[in-house]
Image (cartoon, helix red, strand yellow):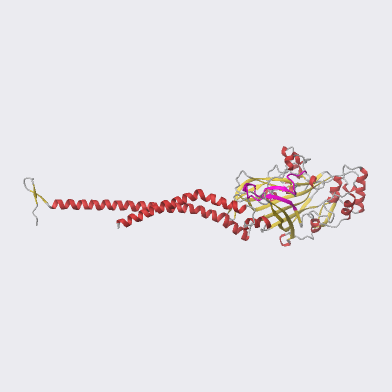
Amino acid sequence: MAASVSKISVGLLVAGIVTAIFGIVLVFVGPIIVDDQIVKNVEINPKNDLSYTMWKDIPVPFFMSVYFYHVLNPKEILKGEKPMVEQRGPYVYSEKRQKENITFHDNHTVSYREYRRYFFEESMSVGNESDVVTIPNMLVLGASVMMEDMPLPVRLMLSTALTLFKEEAFLTKPVGELMWGYDSKLVDFLNQYLPGMLPTSGKFGLFAEFNNSNTGLFTVFTGKDDIRKVHKVDFWNGLKKVDYWRTEQCNMINGTAGQMWPPFMTTESTLPFYSPDACRSMELVFQRKGKMKGIPLFRFVAPKTLFANGTDYPPNEGFCPCRQSGLLNVSSCRHNSPVFMSHPHFYNADPALLNTVIGLSPSEEEHGLFIDIHPETGVPLNVSIKLQLNLYIKRVLGIIQTDRIAEVVMPMIWFEERGYIDGSVLTTFYNNLVVMPALLEYMQYIFIGLGLLFILVAVVLRIREQKRRKSDEIVATDADHRDNTCDTKIDPTGKKMLSEKF
């Protein structure tokens, strides 16, 4: 029995030590295993089903919501009064993005074109595309500013053409036509006599050039040789930098294509990306930590310096000529049309801009953009990109359609592109990147706990065995002592006598 207990305690001790060591090894090796799996899964590789599918086809809900600034007082604006607008919308479109012409290269890069298609979602909208709104007529007011420095006879000719084609300073049309294009004899005229002035030779619409189009030829790193470079742009349309801006820094193509970023982010990380629509690189900064359905995330937002002018933020001097902070002059990449980008309702912009238009009320909750990123993988969980399109308008001598319009940056529309991980993609993402790492972490402590428990039980059994042995030895010693006592007698004189044997 004693030998059996001894073997059990030794077995438990060995098992406990092995189990505890395995748990301790997992503490150090576990994160390495998880990181290695992340590296393998975020690399742009057709063998990585989840991440490659998310990168290639974006199989998650993605929508574009468009809000129009309906002009309430167009006649008064022509007399020099302050514009008054009313927000109409949203008009919501589901957005389908798909990468095509995907070509992998030997230098661990991949080239592709991403096509965008939009489908109107009436059930998610406040109205339908037949709703009529009034906005500034870009063909009139934009062309007028563009022709401001031309000789007076040229301006008079433009004014005559506008009158001939019955074009006025403000345009009242259905939402669908303003979005995707309408026939215009003026467009045909301008394309004939001023070729290259307009971005289209067909119908003219605010988003006509975006639907069923691609964002250019991107070449990005796959991350195979260096995971820190995954998704980063190597070339865009064969270019390392653009030539729209005045400084080399502003012309640089930095960061990713704006859909995924390298893994293992910290609170010091930023989200740089190149936007073909804005014709420049932009960078978001860390705001706070959070969770989305149990998945940890980092929220990144636009810094106040993103659209600041060169006076308030010298590095942005290359994006000038500038106006007030909060406006990005994109005329250099929009055929020199006087178009400015900003946050909706001039959020984070110079307060002076709000004083020039009645009907704006900016707030961070409704008009601030953000991207929620899973920091370990660099995969966006929730995206909300909000931007506003503005037209610089003013009175131009010789063009009667501009009448006495005051100089103002006039908001036309703002739009939000939003998407989020949901459904089976969210479940797979959660299981692979949250549950499994957590399970591995718990296993570390379970093995360490079991190992310590086995060792404790082995020690207890060993101590009890030792106590039992000592107790047996004491009992045996006492028995021997009693036997010796029984075999000896003492005579009255104090001398010992051998006892009589019976």
Q: Is residue 369 left or right of residue 467?
A: right
Quadrant (top left, top right, bottom left, bottom right) of the N terminus: bottom left
Q: Position of residue 411 (x, y in %)?
A: 78, 49
- Residue at image point 57% right, 53% down: 37
Q: Which residues are magenta?
A: 215-243
Front-most of residues 176 and 53: 53
In the orientation shown, which residue stands out farthest toward the bottom? 123
Using the image as rendered, state which of residue 454 and residue 329 is in the foreground: 454
Q: Residue at x 74, y 60 (%)?
A: 119
Residue that appears at 49% across and 51% down? 26
Q: Position of residue 210 (x, y in %)?
A: 77, 54
The percent position of residue 260, horizontal first and vertical second, equals: 66, 51
Q: Is residue 21 left or right of residue 135?
A: left
| Quarter that holds the C terminus | bottom left
Residue 90 is covered by the magenta coloring: no
Q: Position of residue 287 (x, y in %)?
A: 63, 46
